Image (tube, helix red, strand yellow):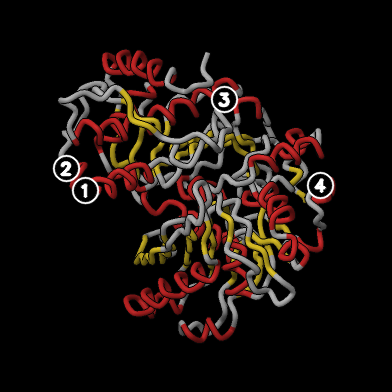
Amino acid sequence: MFLGIDIGTSAVKSVLVDADERILATASEPLQVSRPQPGWSEQDPDSWVSATLTTLDALKMSHGAALARVEGIGLSGQMHGATLLGPDDRPLRPCILWNDGRSTDECVTLTHAVPELSVITGNLAMSGFTAPKLLWVRQHEPDIFRRIATVLLPKAYVRLALTGEKVDEMSDAAGTLWLDVAARDWSNECLAATDLSRAQMPRLIEGSEPSGRLRSELAARYGMTTPPVVAGGAGDNAAGAVGLGAIRSGDAFVSLGTSGIVWATTNRFAANPSSAVHAFCHALPGLWHQMGVMLSAASCLSWWARIVGRSEADLLAELPRRPSGPGVALFQPYLSGERTPHNDASLRGAFAELAHETDRPALTQAVLEGVAYGIRDCLDALSQAGTRVESATVIGGGSRTHFWVALLADVLGLPLHRVAQGEVGAAFGAARLGRLAATGESPTAVCRPPAILETIVPTPAFTRTYAERYERWRNLYPGRT
């Protein structure tokens, strides 16, 4: 038995997987995000730990015998979060999350301090990344900065609680702006630019390697006679890639989760940050990836549902199964700023081209289309970086909505595959990494693509009309020329 734990932004999800890769049980516990000021986004690190244990308690209640036989555990997590610990390993403040935009000025400072930053890290300095957040803390909370003994990413803090080990892995570390991504090692130069050192960083391993074992008291709590191995794990998107078997150069997927992702696996470090494309390590040795990222994807639908006081399911039920071309309204999905291709934390969302006859379903469709156009921006940015995508798998919560996936296929002009376990991909991928760490099996033997439930092929006529509508949508952005 193997266990995958995904520490997301909106929830912790745990999945119990058997040796035949059947998902026996899942459990989820919601998380809350604090927004103390506009553009800020924070979470209590201890809420990740308590939510994780709540999901494991639920699995014990429903599948206690299977949970007791777990051999390996993998962790997946939201990336970039600055979790600052004092000498007692307790958080000094709430974690500053990946979609927090307060450190825009610090990005400029960091870029000036390390002129070769994008060459070393493969990425532009963005406020969502970890290093600029530390410069912000140094400037605005100097008393806290002076007390920092360790900086961890979210899943590494959960690992510390589960194992007592301060360890992280390459895919998550690549999103800090402290990693030499080609060398897969901390960069002394980048750390020094934020007045930090290797002594304040966790030990680095590959995602498929053991990081430690579950604490004996937790193993006893869940009836485990031998504490299972805990793998290095992966950042959420790399874990999703492992779950999809996207471990060969050219493999691609789209994630419609809280954020939106276009991913392409590469067998070399291929940095091209000019269009705000990310170049990160994969969770497996010898692999990297390129990624276009939009900060608000499925979270846009959640926002719209909250505004109109309806559930997401109710809003989607008002739409047909398949779109019949572009809607009448436009929506910009920049609720938390944007990364690819704009790298602009100050961007905000908007509706446009509204009329007296514009109704709620039309605005719901506009929200879904706005996200699809943002994904198209990411795909175009990857194309400019030399990556060609012929088809892609769709994962994340948005993948369960046929209308949205069909709309996305039309906008991108690509066949899109809906797959089994598409909504628990990160946790499932984490379980696979737990298995690799426990058994030493080959990644190619374990990380196979899931069954395709459905391939949605774009409608050529709609792709043409969406291309025209996309250009109109692009021109809403004030920086376009």
Q: Nearer the viewer, residue 345 or 316?
A: 345
Numbered circle sitting on residue 313: 1
Q: Which residue is mark 2?
A: 317
Distance, label 1 to label 2, CA atoms, is 6 Å
Q: Is residue 261 left or right of residue 186?
A: left
- According to the picture, the residue beneath numbered tag 4 turns out to be 193
Q: Nearer the viewer, residue 331 or 246?
A: 331
Q: Position of residue 10 (x, y in %)?
A: 42, 57
Q: Earlier in the sequence, mark 2 or mark 4?
A: 4
Front label number (3 vs 2): 2
Judge whether 386 appears above or below 33 on screen. Answer: above
* Distance Cα–Cα, label 2 vs label 4: 51 Å
User: Which image quadrant is residue 326 in?
Assistant: top left
Q: CA distance from mark 1 to mark 3?
A: 35 Å
Q: In the image, what residue occupies the spot 48% across and 55% down?
A: 35
- Secondary element under disc 1, as helix, strand or loop, is helix
| Labelled pair 3, 4 in contact (Cβ < 8 Å) | no
Per the image, the residue denoted by label 3 is 387
Q: Is residue 261 above or below residue 342?
A: below
Residue visible at 67% across and 31% down in the picture? 270
SS at mark 4?
A: loop
User: From mark 3 to mark 2, how far is it between C-alphas?
Assistant: 36 Å
Q: How many marks?
A: 4
| Residue 157 badge | none
Going from the N terminus, do you reach mark 1 or mark 4 first? 4
**Residue 17 in view:** no
The kind of residue on which mark 2 rests is Ala
